[in-house]
Image: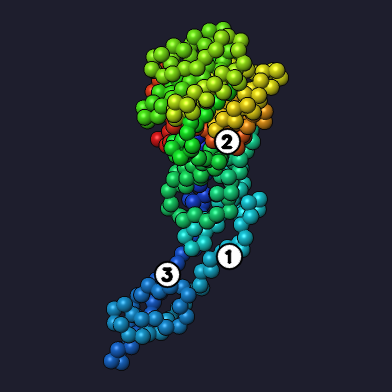
Amino acid sequence: MFEKLKEKLGGFKKALGTVLETKEKEAIKTEPAKVESVKVKTVKAGIKTDVKADVKTDLNTRVTSSETGEIGEIRKTPEPAIPPKAPEKFGIFDKIKAAVFEQEFIIEESSVKDILWELEMALLESDVALPVAEKIVESIKLELVGTRRKIGSDTGKIVEDALKKAILKVISVDYFDFDEFIKKANKPVSIVFVGVNGTGKTTTVAKMAERFKSQNYSVVIAAGDTFRAGAIEQIDRHAEALGIKIIKHQEGSDPAAIIYDAIQFAKAKHKDIVLADTAGRMHININLMDQLKKICRVNNPDLIIFVDEAIAGNDAVERAKLFNSAVPFSGSILTKADADSKGGAAISISYTTGKPILFLGVGQTYKDLVKFEPQWLISRLFE
């Protein structure tokens, strides 16, 4: 999962780490000497004796002998070494040259500009949306450029920490705890699943039903996809396999009415959850999008979940944006994440829609559904 993205992030970490190590070596070479050995003379019982003592160059006329503990006069005082003056302000776009100041060096923009451009290209190649790639690169630039770093610090960790912070910013948008929401919400909780054709929406409804059932919630499924041939039979088989009640009408029936009936049944029978399947539809099909608006207007669901394939990359991101503008949803579920080597959709959808990713589908069985946590994704990318 996300192997290509992990590889590209690893390459960036190594390349930028090399750049920082080079700047550190240059800084060490320019560091002025702090200590010099000078001759001092001490007076003891009328006898003058020359001894060596290590003294700091900022001393003026008197030192203490390390051998006698007595005060003597310096015969020769070296010129004091003056460290270079540190810039008063380190702006992001200032062309600051790396310099040493009290065992530190400054990361200049010119030294990381090219490598940040390469990172942006690598993110785009991994299907990360352009505004998201730009946001990640800008966050890393803010984290690093113009900052002081201790000589001898772990450059690899510096780069990795900057990457983690940047990616967390774009995937943690409007995060909420799905399980906590379900636990506290008034029952029955109605959830409508929407999305385009062929993305695994019906199977995802069955996986969610299995998950709720394993948490001891009572579940009802509404067969709201009356448009696709065989859709009712498909969801009916899932319900039978899971031992879950299904509310269905004939093919071609009004999906809004079916979902309404399912919610009323759940209220009458004191069921906890209503999961409503809907027909897949392209966002450019005005009639079907109007139908979806009607479903949500009539039933006022507690949650609307957008379902798409992780492997669709930027297409999934664009579809999510258009669905969200037509029927504002609560969050997303990405299917086939186990087959996604790029990871662009997983990183981009939250930021572009302002809505969290809730789950990832990672296999074909009912239990192959992973609750999405930002830290979980970060650990997968940097394990």
The answer to which of marks 1 and 3 sits earlier in the sequence is 3
Farthest residue toward the bottom? 46
| Residue at (51% x, 73% y) in the render | 79
- The residues tagged by marks 2 and 3 sit, at their Cα atoms, a distance apart of 63 Å
Horizontal side of residue 224 vs 241, given as left or right? right
Compared with 104, 137 (above or below) is above
| Residue contact at pointers 1 and 2, CB within 8 angstroms | no
In the rendering, at what x and y percent does residue 197 appear?
58, 16
Q: Residue at x 48, y 50 (%)?
A: 25
Q: Judging from the image, what secondary structure is the residue with disc 1 in?
A: loop
Identify residue type, mark 3. Answer: Glu
Q: Amino acid at mark 1?
A: Lys
Q: Earlier in the sequence, mark 1 or mark 2?
A: 1
Report crowding for label 1: few under 14, some 14 to 19, many 20 or more residues within 10 A (C-alpha).
few
Give the labeled residue for mark 2: 355
Please give the name of the residue rendered at 51% of the width and 44% of the height, measured from the top-left corner. 165
From this view, report whether residue 306 is shown above or below residue 71. above
Q: Quadrant of residue 323?
A: top right
Name the quarter where the N terminus is drawn.
top left
Marks 1 and 3, how far apart at CA:
22 Å
Quadrant of the rendered image containing residue 320? top right
Whether residue 224 appears in this view of the structure is yes
Q: Does residue 47 lie above or below 133 as drawn? A: below
Residue bearing the label numbered 3: 36
Residue 279 picture location, percent across and down: 59, 16
* Residue picked out by circle 1: 85
Numbered disc in front, either 1 or 3: 1
Q: How is the image coloured?
A: rainbow
